[in-house]
Image (cartoon, grey):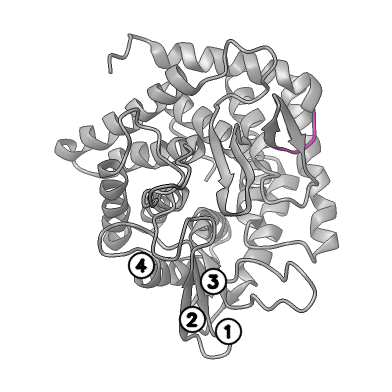
């Protein structure tokens, strides 16, 4: 694949233009998946609520467009009611408040945003079960359901909120919880070959590992590609905060598995281990997230290794921009086509996803020299 000079600058320009344009309809609401070209909106309590304001903050950082700031600020304030309602809070507190409150605090120093992010960190820390050393993923989805022992690989991306809380307050409790959860992931989620479990179920009373659940992957022993992306980026972020070499080595091992199993066009199928007869839809969101993790690993390894990870991350982003971008479609609000949210439940398959758009924009911004992360 030949990458033209300055393609990342062009990609960023296209991203800014499209986000600015779509913001006139989406405004301060919470898009999740694009259906027939239009982003469907979710309640503020949905786990993806942070990605649109996070995308707005990425663009605002460059353009200083006050309208985008006002939309992002309003999204953040709407999340206050989610905290008050409480019952719908889960481990994705990290996704939601990192890309809203923490983003605004890092960019503008807002004291109100700092306070919100610290409150969110406390609520996330409260989900930690000392028996099993895991942060509980979800509350019951229906009356009578018991998922108190469920932990998922996605939570690696929520840990930076805890590390930040320790850094900003000097209170080590937050980072100890984050480290304990990441250590548990090393033991129970990341397999020797670098593939990754999605869900691990523990006995919440004893901490004993009971079983592995396939979750959004094809099967318990398959290899859900977005789970690999969460692990690559999440483990490299944990290394960034702690300097624990085990995390970097885990990120690299998953990255090597991921890169070895990428299709020719560099955008993964929704699961790397699909039997014949199962539709092999792509998941562009997994590609975008993995690319961000690869770019971070490149900054964390020696010069000799760095080019492997940097080139891989850049090539994935270029493939997404060139072959999966919806730049020329005035009837499509998404940036990146062909995401797969939850194939086993047939939810939002082969559509743009707001988190895919966010990670694509973050990766492109990084290629253009913006090194500070909201995470």
Prevailing secondary structure of the magenta residues: loop
**Rendered image: mark on residue 132:** 2
Q: Nearer the viewer, mark 1 or mark 3?
A: 1
Q: Write the start and end of the magenta stretch as one range.
A: 27-32
Q: Which residue is mark 1?
A: 204
CB atoms at circles 2 and 1 under 8 Å apart? Answer: yes
Q: Which residue is mark 4?
A: 186
Could you say whether the residue bearing mark 1 is in a helix, strand or loop?
loop
The answer to whether 85 appears left or right of 113 in the picture is right
Residue at x 42%, y 63% (from the top left corner): 197
Residue 370 visible in the snapshot: no
The answer to whether 196 appears left or right of 18 in the picture is left
Residue furthest front in the image: 277
**Rendered image: mark on residue 173:** 3
Cα distance between the residues tagged 1 and 4: 19 Å
- State the image quarter where residue 242 is shown: bottom left
Which circle's residue, 3 or 4, is located before the other in the chain? 3
Which circle's residue, 2 or 1, is located before the other in the chain? 2
Quarter of the figure with the N terminus: top left
Which circle's residue, 1 or 4, is located before the other in the chain? 4
Cα distance between the residues tagged 1 and 3: 21 Å
Residue 70 in picture, x, y percent from top left: 78, 28
Residue 77 in picture, x, y percent from top left: 81, 44
């Amino acid at each position: 694949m030949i990458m033209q000079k300055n393609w990342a600058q062009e990609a960023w320009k296209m991203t800014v233009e499209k986000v600015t344009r779509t913001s006139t309809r989406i405004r301060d609401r919470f898009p999740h998946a694009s259906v027939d070209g239009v982003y469907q909106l979710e309640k503020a309590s949905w786990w993806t609520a942070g990605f649109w304001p996070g995308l707005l903050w990425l663009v605002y950082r460059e353009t200083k467009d006050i309208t985008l700031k006002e939309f992002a600020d309003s999204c953040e304030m709407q999340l206050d009611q989610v905290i008050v309602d409480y019952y719908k809070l889960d481990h994705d507190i990290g996704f939601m408040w990192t890309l809203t409150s923490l983003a605004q605090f890092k960019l503008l120093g807002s004291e109100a945003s700092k306070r919100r992010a610290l409150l969110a960190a406390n609520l996330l820390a409260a989900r930690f079960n000392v028996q099993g050393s895991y942060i509980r993923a979800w509350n019951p989805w229906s009356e009578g359901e018991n998922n108190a022992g469920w932990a998922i690989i996605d939570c690696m991306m929520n840990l930076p909120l805890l590390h930040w809380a320790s850094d900003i307050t000097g209170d080590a409790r937050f980072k100890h919880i984050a480290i304990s959860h990441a250590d548990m992931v090393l033991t129970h989620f990341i397999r020797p070959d670098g593939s990754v479990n999605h869900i691990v179920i523990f006995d919440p009373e004893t901490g004993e590992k009971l079983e592995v659940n396939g979750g959004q992957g094809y099967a318990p022993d398959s290899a859900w590609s977005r789970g690999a992306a969460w692990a690559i980026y999440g483990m490299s972020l944990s290394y960034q905060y702690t300097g624990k070499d085990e995390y970097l080595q885990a990120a690299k091992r998953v990255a090597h598995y991921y890169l070895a199993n990428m299709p020719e066009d560099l955008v993964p199928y929704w699961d790397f281990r699909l039997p014949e007869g199962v539709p092999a839809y792509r998941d562009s969101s997994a590609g975008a997230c993995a690319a961000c993790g690869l770019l971070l690993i490149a900054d964390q390894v020696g010069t000799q290794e760095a080019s492997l990870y940097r080139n891989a991350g850049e090539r994935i982003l270029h493939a997404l921009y060139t072959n999966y971008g919806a730049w020329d479609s005035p009837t499509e609000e998404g940036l990146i086509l062909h995401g797969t949210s939850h194939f086993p439940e047939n939810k939002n398959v082969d559509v743009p996803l707001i988190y895919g758009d966010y990670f694509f924009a973050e990766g492109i911004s990084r290629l253009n020299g913006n090194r500070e992360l909201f995470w």
